[in-house]
Image (spheres, rainbow, N blue to C red):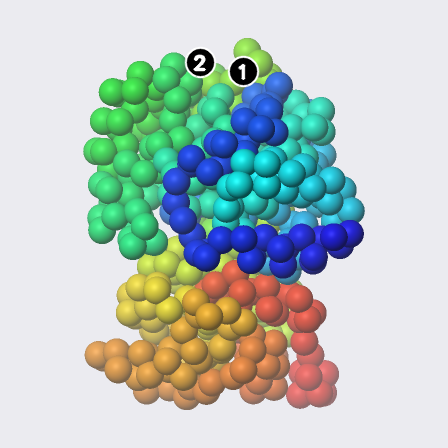
Amino acid sequence: MNQLSDWLAHCERLHPKNIDLGLERVQAVAQRLDLRFECPVVTVAGTNGKGSTCAMLEAIALQAGYRTGVYTSPHLVHFEERCRIGGEIVQAQDLLPHFERVEAARAAGGVALTYFEFTTLAILNLMAASGLDLAILEVGLGGRLDAVNVIDTDCAIVTSIDLDHQEFLGPDRESIGREKAGILREGRPAIVSDPMPPHSAIQYAGALGADLWLLGRDFNFSGDKQQWAWAGRGRRYAGLAYPALRGANQLLNASGVLAAFEALRSRLPVTAQAIRNGLAMVELPGRFQIVPGQPVLVLDVAHNPHSVAALAANLDAMGFYPTTHAVFGAMADKDLGPMLAKMGPLVDRWYFTDLPTQRAASARALRERWQAAPGRRDVPASTHASPEDALRAATAAAEPTDRIVVFGSFYTVGGVLAHGVPRLSSKHLG
């Protein structure tokens, strides 16, 4: 296998399940690989805000002159997006020897890894061999039993906790909070940036003996329309510009990031200027990403009720648009009712789309779910075979002063980005 696509196809065939939570298989292979990091490791868990938190950690560390490695998932368009070294997406060819190493270790032990477990180990192996100053690891699902948790963190960050993946993590925030807290380690900093964390997470941190940093107790922030300020246990920053990432929750994420750097100051000092520059330059595709032009285009991977509520608030704050067109595709196991209800008042025309995975709800099923919603607005709705087709239809129907929102699954936003963004029809050019 001399192509990344060959290895990814191989990974998909190894295990009968897409998700099979548990660390025993991953630990067995990691031990054979002698997988370890010589640099500080920050592990990030949470329902929403993980990607933004990782991006801000990376941007500030890069501005401070550190060599960073970042692992995030899933990807939007290309698998290689899941790993960045020194701020650059890894090349497919650079991943191949690490897939080979994982395969040799896996086969020697007769271990059946899932796609996620295998690819996670390959990327971790690459990162461990890359001479990093800081490793930033985003949890895929939950925390306690996620493959990323095979690495002992030096500083854990738990972002917002809300309902998602209940079939794996439990039926309520308390159950889910306990699973997220599974990334914490005894005596190590544990940053919780959720302003109302579940009691289970706090209780677990106390019983474990983690160094718990709570928003509102150990660190906090304040701000006005022009700037914001942060204060922690031993340091304050005033007159900060808002992060380049848009959205109402980004100060929560940024506050957790600054707490993590404060907690790691003895091992990874950063200057105030690095913080200012990093927050000003941070980028993250698909998170309330506004593509300028006519009509304006908003891309957001909001795919659960909590993140869709944040998207709705952010859209509301953008001001007036005559018509808002919404392209939406989602997984069938998501809590679709609250998501459609939150966006309903803002959307004047729906474009429901199929997605290229068996886990997805069909466009027809999404439209039927929307039609059955009590009190919904009676607006036009259509179904489409792909996100690209749906966006093309929305672009054709939209006036230059309208707004198009593409949201839902990573497959929805990724499907648009993969084919380029069709803009400026003859109507708009006229």
x and y percent of residue 303 in the render? Answer: 42, 60
Q: Is residue 356 visible?
A: yes
Q: Amino acid at mark 1?
A: Arg
Disc 1 on helix, strand or loop?
A: loop
In-front residue for pair 216/24: 24
* Marks 1 and 2 in Cβ contact (< 8 Å): yes
Q: Is residue 423 left or right of residue 190?
A: right
Tell me the residue that label 2 is attached to.
Answer: 234
- CA distance for labels 1 and 2: 10 Å
Q: Kindly identify which numbered label has been placed on residue 265.
A: 1
- Point 67% across, 76% down: residue: 422
Disc 2 on helix, strand or loop?
A: loop
Q: Is residue 80 left or right of residue 112?
A: right
x and y percent of residue 410 in the render? Answer: 52, 61
Looking at the image, is 316 positioned above or below residue 68?
Answer: below
Quadrant for residue 149, please give it. Answer: top left
